[in-house]
Amino acid sequence: GANAGGRSGAGGQKINKTSSNVQMTHAPSGIKVNCQRERERSKNRFIALRLLVEKVEFQHSGGKEKADTALAKKKKNKARAKRRRTKKAAAASDSEGEG
C-alpha cells in the first residue's frame, strides 16, 4: 500500500501529491532518517527527531540497550507465566476437595 508502517487510512494519490517528507541527518555520526508517516510536516519532523535520537543512542550504546530490554521482558513474562501456573494449580487442587 501507499502507507508505510501498516497504518490504515487515506493514502494513495494524496500522499504522492503532498510533500510532507522530512529528512534529518545527525552530523557527527552521519546517521540519516526519513519520515513521511503523517500528512503534516511538523508531525513528521517530530517523529523523525525521535527516530534519529533513538538511532544515535542505539549506536552509541553499541546496540546493547535493545537486547537488554528484550531479555528483561522475556524474564518478566516467564515469571508471570510461572505465577499463573502455580495459581491455576492451587485453584484446581482447591476445587477437587469440593463435592
Image (tube, rainbow, N blue to C red):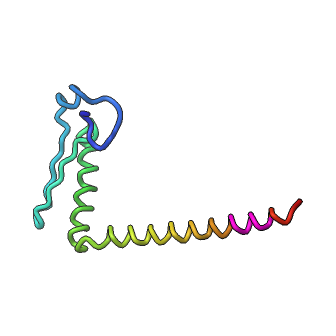
Residue under the image location 16 percent in, 35 percent down = 19
**Residue 47, position in %: x, y?**
28, 50
Residue under the image location 50 percent in, 69 percent down = 76
**Which is nearer the eye, 11 or 99?**
99
**Residue 4, position in %: x, y?**
26, 41
Q: Is residue 21 left or right of residue 75?
A: left
**Residue 6, position in %: x, y?**
32, 41
Q: Looking at the rendering, which quadrant does residue 80 occupy?
A: bottom right
- The extreme right residue here reads 99
**On screen, 13 above or below 82?**
above
- The extreme top residue here reads 13
Q: Looking at the rendering, which quadrant does residue 79 occupy?
A: bottom right
**On screen, 81 above or below 45?**
below
Please identify the dominant SS of the magenta region: helix
Residue under the image location 14 percent in, 60 percent down = 31
Residue under the image location 33 percent in, 70 percent down = 67
**On screen, 47 above or below 85?**
above
The total of numbered circles placed on residues is 0
Q: Which residues are magenta?
A: 88-94
Q: Looking at the rendering, which quadrant does residue 69 occupy?
A: bottom left
**Which is nearer the eye, 95 or 39?**
95
| The N terminus, quarter of image | top left
| The C terminus, quarter of image | bottom right
**Residue 36, position in %: x, y?**
22, 41
* Residue 21 shown in magenta: no
